[in-house]
Image (spheres, rainbow, N blue to C red):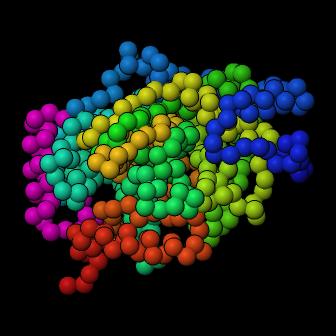
Amino acid sequence: MTKTLVTGPHGPPDISYNLDYDNYLARTQRRLQTEKLPKDLPSGFPQQIQNNLVWDGKDLAEKYDWNYTLTTDDLTEIESALRHFKAQNLGLGFINQDTFPLPNLHKTLRDISKEIHMGHGFKVIRGVPVASHTREENIIMYAGISCHIAPVRGRQSFLDTGVDVALAHVKDMTSVVDGIKIGAPAYTNVKQAFHTDIGDVVALLCLAEGVGGGESYLSSSWKVYNELAATRPDLIHTLSEYWAADTFGKIDIPYWHAPLLYHEPAKDTTPERVILHYSRRTFTGYLGLPRSANIPPLTEAQAEALDALHFTAEKYALSLDFRQGDIQYINNFGLFHGRASFQDSKEKQRHLIRIWLRDPEYAWEIPEPLRNKWDRVYKDVKPENTVFPLEPPIATGSDNNPGRKGLVAKGWHRLVQASQRMLVPS
């Protein structure tokens, strides 16, 4: 039986990437008054999840210390590992637990991985000495520490030559690129809606702070699930159905077709879990990447569900200041993350770098509809074929944009030379 799409009173839903709480409340009231909505949860979905991953940001600090500050001994060991790696004259793709050895800190980092996967879902390592090192050295330390937490690195993107890009820059680029040509809020200074990335663990290192703002927001997606399951079971139905997420013409399919919500029953070695995976902009578009016309339209139920995810997450969110030298590790299956708007100056510009990680020891099972996405991140990533850009080349609105190729080429010629050592035959 084909499901009829329920659109707004005058066509597709009135929703954009920009958040509008009044619009959300009006849509909710209209749907509750005019639609017959399911009162029960989908078959098999729990009424409530109970776990350390279910938390409220308002009182979490009373129960959990999420910071680990590097000790003097830790820093000495990191500096030694940095010298050890550089002496081997390897490409940066070869950073691993053997080439960046941390014999004493290793156990602490493995405990952090366990906390990320089986505890509260995140941890912040503080005190990486970025100010006293070059950009290349900072990347080596960042990747080196991270590989002890989760040894598998994913590709952020890839070049036409087949080279995998393992690191992305999160920075406001509107001073050098027309803002209307930018397709993702990561390259602006605006507020980011709650979302998830692709990959198991999202790692972010703060290279530099801006003038103000830019707080990092985290929220338990399991807490969000519990509230929606208790108050709006119809939205659990909507979230567990298949959605069309825009690929903006970047890959060989026009859209990903998958649910936003998954339920994984308890097994002998793993607890019951729910997984929420989504990015708002893939359903609404953003500036230079507007929503494609050739994909199925959003329904009113989907529009409300998108807003419900954000505003419920906001209700229970935790705000973290992001200091220079902080590395934030996030369980991408169990947490949403977002960001406050921020201000830069010529002298102070907020600059984060991001890698996606996977730890085979603690990794969660990947829902079948997401496997193709995860394969695009982790499958066949080879150290000899991996680069780490020093500067942030960005994708603009579309491949047809005449300025895009020049902009990308200008950025990519600054790839750190060490990343390419193993790409050039001797």
For this rendering, which residue is in front, 47 or 172? 172
Is 293 positioned to the left or the right of 389 in the image?
right
In the picture, the quarter occupied by the C terminus is bottom left
For this rendering, which residue is in front, 141 or 13? 13
Picture quadrant where residue 215 is located: top left
Is 373 positioned to the left or the right of 33 in the image?
left
For this rendering, which residue is in front, 69 or 375? 69
Q: In the rendered picture of this protein, how many numbered marks are placed on residues? A: 0
Where is residue 355 shown, x and y percent of the image? 38, 53
In the image, residue 193 sits, relative to residue 285, either above or below, namely above
Residue at x 16%, y 52% (from the top left corner): 133
Where is residue 79 shown, x and y percent of the image? 11, 48
Residue at x 41%, y 41% (from the top left corner): 343
Q: Which residues are magenta?
A: 70-96
Residue at x 41%, y 35% (from the top left corner): 213
Q: Does the magenta-highlighted stretch encompass residue 93?
A: yes
